[in-house]
Amino acid sequence: MTPPSLMRKMLRIMIDEERCINCNMCIKVCQKGTLQRIEGKEKPQVVRGDLCMLCLSCIFSCPTGAIRVFFSRS
Ligand code: SF4
Ligand code: SF4
C-alpha cells in the first residue's frame, strides 16, 4: 500500500453531535452517501465510512464546525 492510500485508510470522518444543528448540509454535499440519517438517531451518522474519499466537502459545508477528520489505527 502506498503512503497516500495508507494515510487515507487511517483518516476518518466524525460528527460532533453536540455541535450539529441538523441542517443537513453535509448529507447534501456528500457524493458518496457516507453521511446519512438513521432511524432512532437525532443527528446524521457516518454510515459508509468505507466510501469516503476525504474530499472534505462536508467539513467546509458545515456551519458549526461539527465535522472533523481524525486519525485511527484500526
Ligand atoms: S469527506 Fe467527502 S466523501 Fe467523505 S463524508 Fe465528507 S463529503 Fe462525503
Ligand atoms: S452540516 Fe454540520 S450542522 Fe449540518 S447536519 Fe451536518 S454535521 Fe450537522
Image (cartoon, grey):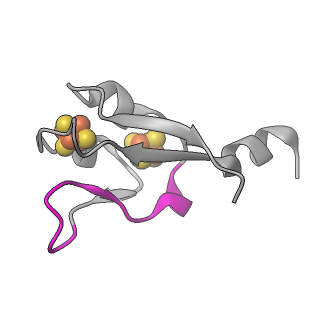
Main structural element of the magenta stretch: helix, strand or loop? loop
Task: Measuring from the top left, give residue 57's x and y in whole percent.
Answer: 39, 33
Image point 29% across, 34% down: which residue? Answer: 66
Is residue 46 found inside the magenta-colored segment of the image? yes
For image coordinates 49% across by 59% down, the residue present is 49
Q: Residue at x 68, y 48 (%)?
A: 10
Q: Quadrant of the rendered structure where residue 50 is? A: bottom right
Residue 23 rendering spot, x and y as whole percentages: 11, 40
User: In the figure, is residue 9 to the left or right of 49?
Assistant: right
Whether residue 6 is visible to the viewer of this picture, yes or no, is: yes
Location of residue 71 with respect to 41 vertically, above or below:
above
Q: How many marks?
A: 0
In the image as oriented, which residue stretches furthest toward the bottom? 39
Picture quadrant where residue 28 is located: top left
Q: Quadrant of ligand 1?
A: top left
Measuring 29% from the left and 41% from the top, which residue is drawn there? 29
Quadrant containing the C terminus is: bottom right
Percent position of residue 17, x then y: 25, 46
4 drawn magenta: no
In the image: residue 50, left or right of residue 38: right
Given residues 50 and 22, the one toward you in this image is 22
Q: Answer left or right for 37 relative to 8.
A: left
Q: Can residue 25 be seen from the camera position used here?
A: no
Q: Nearest the camera: 56 or 15? A: 15
Q: List x then y, in percent, for residue 6.
A: 78, 47
Q: Nearer the viewer, residue 61 or 15?
A: 15
Q: Which residues are magenta?
A: 38-52
